[in-house]
Amino acid sequence: MHMSKLGRGLRLAARCVAGTAVISGLALSSAAAQTKVRWLHVEQNPLVVEYWKEVAQDFEKANPGTTIEMQFLENESFKAKLPTLLQSADAPHLFYSWAGGVMRAQVDAGAVKDITKEMSGEWMDGLNPSAAKAFNHKGKFWGAPERMTRIEFFYNKALFRKAGVDAGQIRTWNDFLKAVETIKKAGITPIAVGGGEKWPVHFYWVYLAIRQGGQAAFQEATSGKGDGFAGPTFVKAGQLFKQLADLEPFQPGWQGTMWPATLGAFGDGRAAMVLSFSGTTPVLQRRNSASGQGIPDEELGTFSFPVVEGGKGLPTDTMGGINGWLVGRNAPKEAVDFLRFLTRAENQRKMGARNLYIPIAKGADAAITSPLLKASAEGLAASTYHQNFYDQDLGPAVGRVVNDTTTDLAAGHLTPEQAARAIQDAWELER
Amino acid sequence: MSSLHSVPTTAAAAPTRSRGGARRKGLRRGVWPVLVLFLPPAFLLFTIFVVLPIGEAAWYSLYDWSGYGAPEVFVGLRNYELLFRNPVFLTALKNNLLIIAVSALVQLPLALWLATLVSHRIPGVVAFRLVFFLPYVLADVAAGLIWRFVYDGDYGLLPALASLVGMTAPYVLADRDLAIYAVLAVVVWKYFGFHMMLFIAGLQAIDREIYEAAEIDGASRLQRFRRITLPLLAPTIRLSVFFSVIGSLQLFDMIMPLTAGGPSNSSQTMVTFLYSFGITRMKIGFGSAVGVVLFCICVTFAFFYRRGVMRHD
């Protein structure tokens, strides 16, 4: 960052003051050197935070002299504040990451520490290789994955019964459209969607593109072959999505609905389905429902995103997140030690056993007991191509354009061609 | 911004105002310590927090920069070109103009009317003033959240009221034709109290005897309002317009919890546009270009308004 002479002077003065504070602090504290690891997360699920706290306490017990300080920022402010924060003296040592384009920008700017050497060997051998690969950029590792999610349809079994729809029969996109029509005819809102935040809408379009064009289409688009994101695969994805949108399947006022309210609407039985994250959905639909009860686990079902007839994508291709932790540039050795501790199989099994997320340590998913999460984990284990969210993978600038345009497409303000063109224009601007 | 702007000018202008022969020398001797003591803090703050950031924003706006590291990819004026081609920016600009228009044509007359009602010394008037002023005391974000609940199509106050009279209210914040008007209603509700207070102060400064004289001369209420109140209140009105225009241009905190600029970017203002298209997209260069344009609009307006309309105030 540019600093004027004046700014530098101020910074020096601030350092002197801070230095004095540190010295006096040292004089006060005991002889044992204290290392504090600042760990910045965005988690809103208290069960996950509770689990992390326990892991941190275990680590502190095993490593006297090290304290783990958990810091929280809400998702949007995390994204907005991180660039400034990472370049300040208070930069977190470990911070949450979705990998993808944002991570690459952070690495390119030198804000992240290379931990390739520390990770090689036993640590790396214990991790799911495709999840670990997400944290590789320029041939080096900058962080470690902790968990994965798959995006899948959750449905309310009672409402499906009432409408006379069998989720097991939904295999293709046409099956799905028919089911939506049937549910609607039964007087039930078929789908809850968080149009106010836009990214829940982009799931549909991206999944349709994956089903239509498979991995090859994405690779060709990102490498600039043909018409890129304005090409036939992505236009077709838009047309298929529009078929759904034309049925008006979403809850009234969906364009203003935020994500928690979306899950709440589903939990209250005001919509029959929601396209959502494996792992957190059963908990969050309960917490956000007006009654606080939500749908009991045995009345919740899931099914994979339907396939597109004639599409090149395989039914086993998946979309979802790969989440983990990046190591800040000035992080102490203890931060890396803690990350290793957090991602080792023993702790990952604990996370699996609590059915919070799908763990990424090899074999840890065997600990999962919830049948729903187990099915998602098996789907991910058998995944032929796992696509990270576009709004992470393509970087924040193109990602937000994808979110904006797919939402406008669903609202009928853009045609499939216009949406695809807008995304390609944004992509070209980034090259 | 305008209040910050005035800090160094008044400080610097103070010594030049002293006129007169013999006293001049003594004054000047007395002025230097004051200058040395009081000018640097204001000057430093102004430089660090106003002048430098403006300069930096202008500099960043020429780069394609993510906010990480130092800006390196020089793109000239491309950010400005992209900005003026961006349809959402034009919507934001239009919305800002709409907010200014509503502030001037709805909010100010409303504030003036209420001020004339509650400026008299009659019992209970203080309570009314307090009630009208309360929305202004609320934080913008809190007001936005409250109104998000009021407008909520499922559990909100508005649909509940509508169902009482047997109607169904639309999902106001989810409708791209209605959302901006919902925002405007909150803006008027939030800020009319502030302008009302300005007007009350202005009204109380008007000499009662003028009204008495006019009454004796047989002037009607309308005549008294048009011929006495309006002209004598003119400086306050001009100031109030100034505040509402600058405030409208900078509207941000209330919109974020209400609509976050949506749906379909229909309720963006220039500052929310800056935030969602600059900061959250990690396009600090582009965002800086928005900031520079906004700054130019504010400065041009402030300059010409003060030079032209407020010249005699």
Image: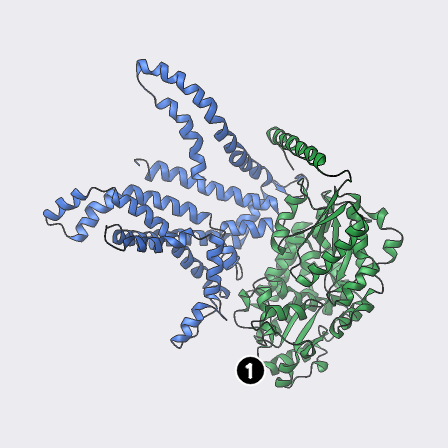
Chain colours: A green, B blue
Q: Position of residue B291 (x, y in %)?
A: 53, 44
Front one among A296 and B311: A296
Horizontal relation, residue A382 to residue B223: left or right: right
Residue drawn at x 77%, y 58% as measured from the top left? A146
User: What is the count of numbered marks?
Assistant: 1
Front one among A94 and A31: A31
| Quadrant, the C terminus of chain B | top left
Q: Quadrant of residue A411?
A: bottom right
Horizontal relation, residue A400 to residue B31: left or right: right
Front one among A355 and B61: A355
Residue drawn at x 71%, y 34% as measured from the top left? A27
Q: What is the residue that sits farthest to the right in this orientation?
A: A121
Q: Quadrant of residue B76?
A: top right
Q: Residues within 10 Å of mark 1 (few under 14, many from 20)?
A: few
Q: Look at the picture and state if B257 lies above or below B25.
A: below
Q: Which residue is mark 1?
A: A187
Q: Look at the picture and state if A234 lies above or below A32.
A: below
Front one among A23 and A253: A23
Residue drawn at x 44%, y 53% as measured from the top left? B138
Q: Chain of mark 1?
A: A
Horizontal relation, residue B23 to residue B293: left or right: left
Q: Quadrant of residue A288?
A: bottom right
Horizontal relation, residue A176 to residue B151: left or right: right
Q: Position of residue B58 (x, y in %)?
A: 56, 38
* Residue A249 seen by the camera: yes
Q: Position of residue B310 (x, y in %)?
A: 33, 38
Assign a secondary structure to mark 1: loop
Q: Position of residue A305 (x, y in %)?
A: 71, 72
Q: Look at the picture and state if B47 lies above or below B167.
A: above
- Residue type, mark 1 in image: Gly
